[in-house]
Amino acid sequence: MGENSVIIQLENIDFSYAGGKPVLDDLCFTLEEGAKLGIIGHNGSGKTTMLHIIMGLLKPSSGTIRAFGKPIETKKDFLDVRRKIGFLFQDADDQLFCPTVLEDIAFGPLNLGKSPTEARKMAMETLERLNLKGFEERVTHKLSGGEKKLVALATVLVMEPKALLLDEPTTGLDEDTNIRIITLLNSLDIGYIIVSHEYDFLARTTRDIYSVQNGQIVYDGDSSALHSHYHRHLMGKFRHRHETLSSQI
Amino acid sequence: MGENSVIIQLENIDFSYAGGKPVLDDLCFTLEEGAKLGIIGHNGSGKTTMLHIIMGLLKPSSGTIRAFGKPIETKKDFLDVRRKIGFLFQDADDQLFCPTVLEDIAFGPLNLGKSPTEARKMAMETLERLNLKGFEERVTHKLSGGEKKLVALATVLVMEPKALLLDEPTTGLDEDTNIRIITLLNSLDIGYIIVSHEYDFLARTTRDIYSVQNGQIVYDGDSSALHSHYHRHLMGKFRHRHETLSSQI
Amino acid sequence: MHISEGILSGPVLISGIALAAAGTAIGLKKLDYDRIPRAAILSAAFFVASLIHVPIGPSSVHLILNGIIGLILGWGAFPVILVALTLQAMLFQFGGITTLGVNTMIMALPAVFCYYLFGRLVGKRPHIAMPAAFACGALSVFFGAVMVGLALTFTEENFLKVSYLVVIAHLPVMIIEGIITAFCVAFLRKVQPDMLPGYSKQTSFTPSKETAGD
Amino acid sequence: MLQEPFSTGNSQIHRLDPRFKMVLATVYAFVVALSNSFPALIAALIFSFALIGLCRLGFLEVAKRIALVNGFIVFLWVVVPLTYDGQSIYYLGPFGVSREGVLVSARITLKSNAILLAFIALIASSTVATLGSALSRLKIPAKIIYLLLLNYRYIFVMEEEYRRLLRSASIRGFRPASNLHTYKTYAYLIGILFVKASDRAERVYNAMLCRGFAGKFYSLHEFSFSRLDLIWLVVMTIVIIGLEILEWVKIA
Ligand SMILES: Nc1ncnc2c1ncn2[C@@H]1O[C@H](COP(=O)(O)OP(=O)(O)OP(=O)(O)O)[C@@H](O)[C@H]1O
Ligand SMILES: Nc1ncnc2c1ncn2[C@@H]1O[C@H](COP(=O)(O)OP(=O)(O)OP(=O)(O)O)[C@@H](O)[C@H]1O
Ligand SMILES: [Mg+2]
Ligand SMILES: [Mg+2]
């Protein structure tokens, strides 16, 4: 593939849930190969909706979706997109349904037509890559929240996607798991889109940050200028300007 | 009741789930009447477990629980505690199990032996107090996430508890609902314990913040010194010290 | 698997109601008040699962799952199936009022029967448990189809041939239910073995640490 | 998503006392189910249509339900006339179409549809929530009613959960087909659904305990029997007596 080839392109997408007001309104967006983007936005601004539209889980009322250069329209087109783009759900509990970790990770490759031996081999390799060796026979349902998230990531990566969409990959996770995920994402050579409320996390994993506002997506800046953390100070003791991104906070 | 009378006192509580390692280890904790406390801590540190022990939903392997001055041991004692302490669950769907909002709110009073007419009256008053008038005949499963949380809070408040325990009351809620809950909590004249990962929310609703670490609970500081927000600054441009709560960040 | 309104005769309808009432009474007696939420929420899962359509050849069938519900709930299957059928009638108008008793019997009696036949076996070693689970799923459908046939034949002797057809038509469903029940039991044995009967006595198949303690 | 399309409305029938509607529907269903004469069955079908008309329900939605439930009836029409003993009135190759078989099929069709339409008019015109509390006033055991109401409440949660899981499967390239992999996947989905249900049940039970639940269910609802109910009681009594007369006239 050529340099900067476009992976996904959304053109003038409109969307509203049945009976609701418009969520996305003439949204345009492009993901280039290898690009690492962050998306922020208020609750309910439509971030999850946008990802679901890319994956073909929701159908926009108007607009076109292009993936790998060609328009995506039929069911078959979307099946194809789903094989090439990995999607990590907001809640790992929704993503894992096999009894053991190994079976869960091998599920995708089996659907792609791999033989059981091959699928198992791919699953083992992915586990190793994510430092999850020894997890293969663990019961998925009984893993901790952070472990579930890592296994969910493994189920996506094993399919060797060309790009990743990650919906709030770190909510509810503790610092250790956070750091593992950051290290992992930085070691990937594919592009991804991360939706998150955590600036700090975005700053450490992405290059450009966009935000979703009024149904559209706008460029927000280079992530290197951003950082966030909880801090305390007595009023007036330390001088720093509180430049916030939106006026509400 | 006297000034600063103690509502709940945990003394040297040990607890571990069947076959697991200790979750709480010699934990001591006191909730005084009218005190508004926040509890933070990593995932799996045992916050939810501690609240369940207070409510008698889990039994500690050793240690004593005192409520309203006397030790709580028998099943009857716990029935009594449950009537006086309201517990808001992490997932509102677990708490709203009746078909309509009114029935759900009246469930508690009916169990306390009120007549249907009385229970209905109490439910209506609570709805009014929470600005939820007009919700009484709504079907619970059709409410939005934020509405469910508010109704769940109503089911707890209708029982006129002497104290509240709230387990992550704002996860997944949007800003508006957040503000409604903050306003409401600030208007209550009873004490409460809030478990949350959101410093900002704790800072606006509680006075003292504790954290759970290594199976114990430790005082973390006065919430007024804490604030948090996302901010950006180029390195070195604004001077401010980053005093964080834990060393990891 | 149910019979619509208007087909069965008075005596069959009445016997169905009487027998279903007896079964439900036993089931309720074994279901303490503090087990009601569990039975109800499992029943909701059962309701949703039985709406799943699985492909078979060029067509698809919806699952019945009375075998697995029997394994999980034992006699509790009676009230749970009665309630699920009532809801199906209220929400989709499947089944009906007069046939509620017969339809409950059609699904619940095989469920309880298979619970007694296979309940102990599904907790044993895999080479016993898996065939037992398959048989449980397949036979619970087979017995159900036979009960449909009996209800029809008792109504009118001339329905005998229809009854044969009903049983034959259920043969593919039996096989699929058998396979799905076997995999489902395999799943529960690994993930939550205490949901299956006979688990407390037989722990040898779960060497993992998480479950060894209790 | 599961819906109750008939429960919204403000017709006379919607306003009847749900306890009364339930008793009426049951008595009427049994009367029709046990009738055999064509005049009685045809009269019942006409009356049921009238009930539907009075409810002012969406025609399309009603038609859909009727079509769905008549699937088994079509099967009967294909099989019964050919297999039923009796006088052949027509030959399809070697098979004789029996007169009695046709009559039985016709009777079943009339009964089935008459009861179904009355059921939609009288029962489906209330929500399950209302029906549940009405049942509790009809001396149905409290355990059954709570099973029903809790089941109903969590169907929606479970369905949502199932759909999210299925979505996760489809995102990983799952396409249902007639093979072992598909059946295994569905079995796992069902398995995890049961496990999640069991976990949730524990949390719900805890929530009930925290609100003072001590093993007894109370009902909040009060229903009142209005004049409209009285009028309908008279109407229905006349209709049922009428149907019985039509039924017995044949025998006499
Ligand atoms: N299934 C649905 N049916 C109807 N409305 C929905 C549905 N899902 C989401 N919405 C609404 O659409 C809007 C956008 O939701 P979406 O989940 O995309 O937001 P989000 O940006 O991902 O928010 P969050 O940060 O809370 O995850 C919200 O107003 C939400 O209430
Ligand atoms: N039912 C259970 N059986 C076994 N272990 C459990 C159970 N519930 C919780 N645990 C374990 O006990 C520990 C404490 O869990 P708890 O839910 O109290 O944590 P928490 O502080 O509330 O975490 P979170 O912030 O994620 O809600 C965790 O390690 C968890 O894995
Ligand atoms: Mg989202
Ligand atoms: Mg918790």
Image (cartoon, coloured by chain):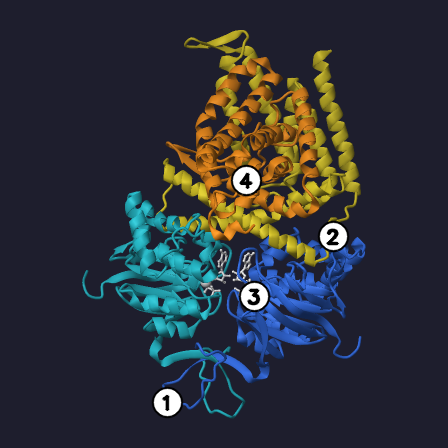
Chain colours: A cyan, B blue, C orange, D yellow
Residue A237: x %, y % from top left: 51, 93
> Looking at numbered disc 4 in the image, what kind of residue is underneath it?
Glu
**Host chain of mark 2:** D
Ligand 2 within 8 Å of disc 2? The answer is no
Cα gap from disc 1 to disc 3, whole angstroms: 39 Å
Ligand 1 within 8 Å of disc 1? The answer is no
Q: Which mark is residue B46?
A: 3
Q: Which mark is residue B236?
A: 1
> Looking at numbered disc 2 in the image, what kind of residue is underneath it?
Ala
Q: Nearer the viewer, mark 3 or mark 4?
A: 3
Residue D128: x %, y % from top left: 64, 44
Ligand 2 within 8 Å of disc 3? The answer is yes
Q: At 61% from the left edge and 65% from the top edge, which residue is drawn? A: B14
Instruction: Tell me whether marks 3 and 4 sit on the same chain.
Output: no
Q: Which mark is residue D61?
A: 4
Residue extending furthest toward the top: D87
Cα gap from disc 3 to disc 2, whole angstroms: 28 Å
| Secondary structure beneath label 4 | helix
